[in-house]
Amino acid sequence: MRRSGTSLFDAVLLFRESLYGTLVIAAACSVLGVYVVLRRIVFVGAALAELSSAGIALALWLAGHGFALGLSTHPIALSLLLTIGGVLFFGSGSGRGRVPPDATIGVTYAVAGAAGILLISKAAAGEAHEIFLHGNILGITRTDTLVLLAVAVPVLVAHAAFYKEFLFVSFDRETARTLGFRVGLWNLLLYLTLGLVIAFAMQFAGVMLVFNFLVVPAVTGLLVARSMGGTFLWSIASALAAAVAGFSLSVPFDLPSGPAIIAVSGVLALGAFLVRLAQRR
Amino acid sequence: MTALVSFDHATLGYGRRVVLSDLNFDIPEGDFLGIVGPNGSGKTTILRAILGTLAPLKGAVRHAANLRYGYVPQRDQVDYHFPLKVVDVVIMGRYDRIGLGRRPARKDRDLACAALDHVGILALADQPLNALSGGQKQRTLIARALVGQPNVLILDEPTNGMDLVSTTQILGLVRELHERDGLTVLMVSHALNEVANYVERIALVNDGGFRIGNVDEIMSSSVLSGMYGIPVDVDSVNGHRIVVARREGDARDIAHTGGLVQPHHHATQRDELV
């Protein structure tokens, strides 16, 4: 896909719809990612992403075997179904009996990941395997972007409106409970918004890129900022910057877009770490 | 005095597991009560029943109308990775009053600063929480509990992991809040020696047993030896009570413990007492 002579600007212009969609995914994931990192549920995010991808794989497998039954077997529907199932499981604190919570997350991650790969290996769709693993952000259309916006905007509005509730139950759930906050309900709502964003983002961005947007920008934000507001702003800014830079570099240089964006995210996080290090001296 | 919380033959536990049974006592207004016992004895279970977050399996736990708690959790229950300023943490104590989906106003910040001033760390209001010492963090959490203008201040293991100086300062502050402001205070701790020299009443919890009374009544060799099941001495140094678990072979007789002594428990139980 190398376009000799094509300027960076032309390349971005050509795929601008894809870039817009990627920016929506980056913004939504980077906001939720602050909670994911601070609450130490990074691997819940990874497990939900794997469950979501297993849903996509199941839909593709069903389609490949002539079981496409309309909306119920659409990749988004099955992806959402499995992700919400995971949200209810992790959000309700299930698995806290004899099995430690992180082991439950690990089992879900491994089994969902393997199930997805097994299903996709038997799916008839040609490039399904590649798209499944790495996503296909270059294939995002204007309609896809509008769908992503329809999910991301309500989620972000809910997080802006109920910021103090989400913050309190994340920071100190026992005290929140004593002040009458319904901690279980707020936790579930937080997980639900996370599951929704992951399920829709996974359709286009793939496991690696979604996981990146959930973790790396938030880490950058935490390294640079000294307040919650600053952390959210730096997280969003670094996610958007990584999306634009990675996307812009990947098209003219014929690089896979997802890994290019992840690489830029990593460089930004490293830069933030070095800045933090310099400030301490 | 009016009872703020009443345990009426309450049995507490989780599911089918009974932790403490037939609890029957009141917490009157103006009380300064220490709930003391080893880890795993049921202190937190009583605390949850008082806070209303755990319903009794049998009997009843009654709360006075318009009762408002100021809760100071164990320090390790709070996550210090959050990039929050001290004043932001204190404002959380007013979140329930601010209302769903609304942001704190100037008034909330002013009240938070007043609470910080009350506990002597107003100068740290704009400092990051994770930059504070253990004692300063505890003061921040106490300020957060106070900013909601509670009837009862509840502290869960307030001196856990603190050095001697910080422990003395925090317990001194808590006693000051009780004496100066007339605040009802409940303090949960495993450290009998610390609590006994500050509170007015003690509730002793151990191995399913429960005993409550004035400090003089509880801090006797016979009561403590009976509750802990090992021979215990209560001595006094400069007016401060010190509880010491007696070692095997010590001169004093253990007969006064009423046959509850189990010598092979000495080594482990001794640590828990102090």
Image (tube, coloured by chain):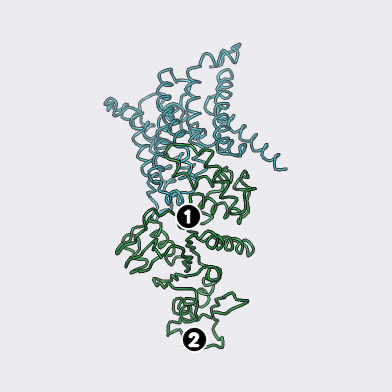
Chain colours: A cyan, B green
Image height of B249 relative to A175, above or below: below
Q: Chain of mark 1?
A: B
User: Which residue is tagged 2?
Assistant: B254
Tags 1 and 2 on a common chain: yes
Residue sticking out furthest to the right: A281
Q: Quadrant of the C terminus of chain B?
A: bottom right
Q: Chain of mark 2?
A: B
Image height of A87 relative to A178, above or below: above
- Quarter of the rendering containing residue B164: bottom right
Circle on res. A64: none
A241 and B102: which is toward the camera = B102
Image-based side of A264 in relation to B182, left or right: right
B134 and B203: which is toward the camera = B203
Q: Position of residue A116 (x, y in %)?
A: 39, 35
Q: Position of residue B237 (x, y in %)?
A: 61, 77
Secondary structure beneath label 2: loop
Q: Quadrant of the N terminus of chain B?
A: bottom left
Q: Nearer the viewer, mark 1 or mark 2?
A: 1
Q: How many marks?
A: 2
Q: Position of residue A278 (x, y in %)?
A: 71, 39
Secondary structure beneath label 1: strand
Q: Position of residue A208 (x, y in %)?
A: 49, 33
Amino acid type at circle 1 is Tyr
Image height of A202 relative to B220, above or below: above
Residue under the point 43% across and 85% down: B258
Image-based side of A42 in relation to A192, left or right: right
User: Which residue is tagged 1?
Assistant: B71
Crowd around label 2: few <14 · some 14–19 · many ≥20 (10 Å): some
Amino acid type at circle 2 is Ile
Residue under the point 44% across and 73% down: B213
